[in-house]
Amino acid sequence: MNENEHAVKIEFLVQIKIQKPVAEVFDAVIDPAKLCAYFTSSVTGPLAEGKIVNWQFSEFPDLDIPVTVLEVRPCELIHFEWPTNQEDYKTTVRMNFEVLAAQDTRVSVVESGWHETDKGWEDSYLNCYGWTHMLCCLKAYLEHGINLRAGSF
């Protein structure tokens, strides 16, 4: 066996069921105005395949995070890459949208690609927390019209 056969793949999956139609859920992630209503503080454009969109967050006001959109399949998938925290490489994010019923959608986020270092593991845990928070905020926004991030940071 070579060393690659025993390599650990740093990857996580978080998911949530949102009681809204898949088109409404998908739109709340793609549309910059809606994304800013529950997750980001600023977005430079919609998540469109082949585009680079910058995201800002209120807790990091001087940081523009470039999101390179690799693939978009309406109401199914948003696939992008973005830089890791304080490192010089990118991870990939796959957001999947699954119809469970007419008014129920499962959103899952899989992020992978960290280096197998202490810093890579630490950053993966932080992003896992961040995506879990994002999905909870998305659910609260769509189902109850509230912004859970407001005043959180």
Image (cartoon, rainbow, N blue to C red):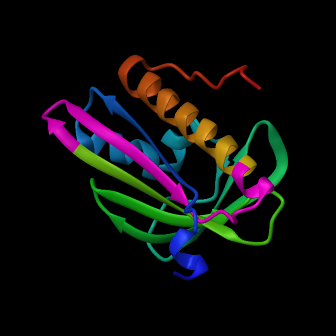
Question: Is residue 58 visible in the rendered structure shown here?
Answer: yes
**Residue 42 or residue 96, whichever sits in front:** 96
Q: Residue 65 lies in what quarter of the image?
A: bottom right
Q: Which residues are magenta?
A: 99-121
For residue 115, above or below residue 16? below
Q: Residue at x 49, y 77 (%)?
A: 50
Position of residue 145 relative to residue 107, above or below, is above
- Residue at figure coordinates x 58%, y 21% from the top left: 148
44 to the left or right of 34:
right
- Quarter holding the C terminus is top right
Q: Is residue 100 magenta?
A: yes
Furthest toward the bottom, the residue is 2
Residue extending furthest toward the front? 1
Whole-percent x and y of residue 68? 58, 70
Say above or below: 88 vs 112.
below
Q: Nearer the viewer, residue 56 or 88?
A: 88
Place of residue 99 in the rendered image (x, y in percent of width and height, measured from the top left): 19, 42
Which quadrant would residue 90 be assigned to in this image?
bottom right
Left or right of 61 in this view: 47? left
Query: In the shown orientation, is residue 128 left or right of residue 31?
Result: right
